[in-house]
Image (tube, helix red, strand yellow):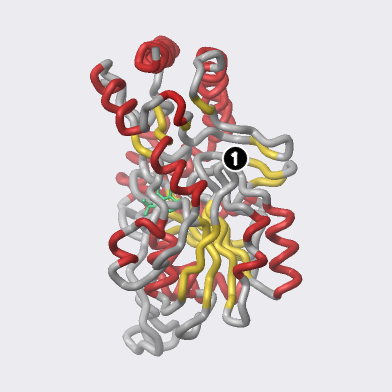
């Protein structure tokens, strides 16, 4: 099987993790943690970084910083991974969904304003599959309605919106560094914030809300969301070569675009004129006229030794939320179609040019 996302770990990555190991700083203090936070925040153009154990934890912290009261609402895309919706619910908020743009697959900024109520506190933008959401209209709506904008930038390391990096556009941003991400620490995440007060709050929440003046006295409930210095060492080594990582992801995408552009019945990922897409994954959306769903194409590709993953299933279609009475009767046609007709093909950094051609041939044969 050609794997959908095999990570690339270099000798330098290994040497740096080994150095952290030999230093004895193996838990959540150490020079690599400080460096990882500083360098990632600087890369994204934000002043403060708080490294955490994964991207879902980063979202929990980001949403905690909103100080939601029961019944407060947060607007998010229906087409997303479940993590941001879980974070809103766990913080006592109500998730309010909007549909996606059929071309870019991003949250449709034109649908947001009609979903705003007096209880709306924030817009949680999830940039999808390597491409930025259309941020200017979203930031403009947020300004006019006095809302906080959180960017979930897990899938867009290095992607740009009008020349500015994703994760540096809103008030707060979050990242995952899971093994399939452009920069990985195995498991890992980060929250970026603009104010020193928010940074301090996030650091405290990350570490069980220990007090500075009296360590085992607690005034609030916290979490253990700490990242280790070993993981951060891997992260710093990867930030050193993020430019090459982005170049390689874009090379993989342009090879697929070249090899697949004439295949009838499939839509390839867009790159809007205002966007730099980093193609975290390379998605295909099948037209209905092919008579095939994404699940059927996935079977045909598996027979040809090509691993795939389905697109997200919309949040309104999730039993876990329907069973709680959420999103009843709501329809998001673009999210529904993407879920039914979309999948992504291998595009990990360890993929060879030969494998790219094999995958493209398999797609072509499966559709002929
Ligand atoms: C957009 C987005 N947000 C959050 C997460 C959750 O990150 P993690 O798996 O590190 O908890 C992911 C994971 O892939 C993601 O794609």
Is 234 rendered above or below residue 83? above
Residue visible at 58% across and 52% down? 107
Residue visible at 55% across and 21% down? 251
Measuring from the top left, give residue 121's x and y in whole percent: 59, 76
Camera sees residue 6: no
Is 64 rendered above or below residue 25? below
> Mark 1 — residue?
104
Viewer-side residue, 331 vs 80: 331
Residue at disc 1, secondary structure: loop
The answer to whether residue 102 is left or right of residue 135 is left
Camera sees residue 326: yes
Measuring from the top left, give residue 23's x and y in whole percent: 34, 48
Residue visible at 49% across and 85% down? 69
Residue 16 sits in quarter: top left
Q: Residues within 10 Å of mark 1 (few under 14, many from 20)?
A: some
Q: Quadrant of the C terminus?
A: top left
The answer to whether residue 341 is left or right of residue 277 is left
Residue visible at 48% across and 82% down? 71
Measuring from the top left, give residue 246's x and y in whole percent: 56, 31
Viewer-side residue, 229 vs 114: 114
């Amino acid at each position: 099987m050609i794997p959908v996302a095999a990570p690339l770990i270099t000798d330098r990555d290994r040497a740096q993790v080994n150095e952290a190991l030999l230093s004895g700083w193996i838990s959540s203090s150490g020079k690599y943690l400080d460096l990882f936070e500083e360098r990632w925040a600087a890369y994204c153009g934000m002043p403060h970084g708080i490294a955490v154990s994964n991207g879902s934890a980063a979202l929990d912290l980001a949403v905690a910083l909103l100080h939601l009261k029961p019944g407060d609402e947060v607007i998010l895309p229906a087409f997303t991974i479940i993590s941001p919706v879980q974070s809103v619910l766990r913080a006592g908020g109500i998730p309010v969904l909007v549909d996606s743009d059929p071309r870019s697959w991003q949250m449709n900024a034109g649908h947001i304003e009609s979903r705003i109520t007096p209880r709306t506190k924030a817009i949680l933008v999830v940039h999808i599959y390597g491409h930025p959401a259309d941020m200017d209209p979203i930031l403009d709506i947020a300004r006019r309605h006095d809302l906080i904008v959180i960017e979930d930038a897990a899938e867009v390391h290095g992607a740009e919106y009008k020349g500015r990096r994703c994760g540096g556009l809103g008030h707060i941003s979050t990242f995952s560094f899971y093994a399939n991400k452009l920069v990985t620490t195995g498991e890992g995440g980060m929250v970026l914030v603009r104010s020193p007060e928010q940074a301090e709050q996030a650091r405290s929440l990350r570490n069980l809300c220990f007090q500075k003046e009296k360590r085992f006295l607690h005034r609030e409930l916290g979490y253990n969301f700490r990242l280790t210095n070993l993981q951060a060492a891997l992260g710093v080594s990867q930030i050193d070569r993020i430019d090459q990582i982005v170049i390689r992801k874009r090379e993989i995408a342009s090879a697929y675009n070249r090899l697949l552009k004439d295949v009838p019945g499939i839509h390839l990922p867009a790159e809007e004129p205002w966007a730099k897409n980093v193609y975290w994954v390379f998605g295909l959306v099948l037209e209905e006229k092919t008579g095939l769903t994404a699940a059927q194409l996935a079977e045909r590709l598996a027979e040809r030794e090509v691993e795939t993953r389905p697109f997200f299933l919309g949040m309104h279609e999730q039993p876990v939320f329907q069973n709680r009475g959420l999103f009843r009767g709501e329809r998001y046609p673009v999210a529904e179609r993407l879920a039914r007709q979309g999948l992504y093909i291998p595009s990990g950094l360890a993929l060879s040019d030969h494998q790219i051609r094999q995958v493209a041939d398999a797609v072509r044969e499966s559709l002929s």
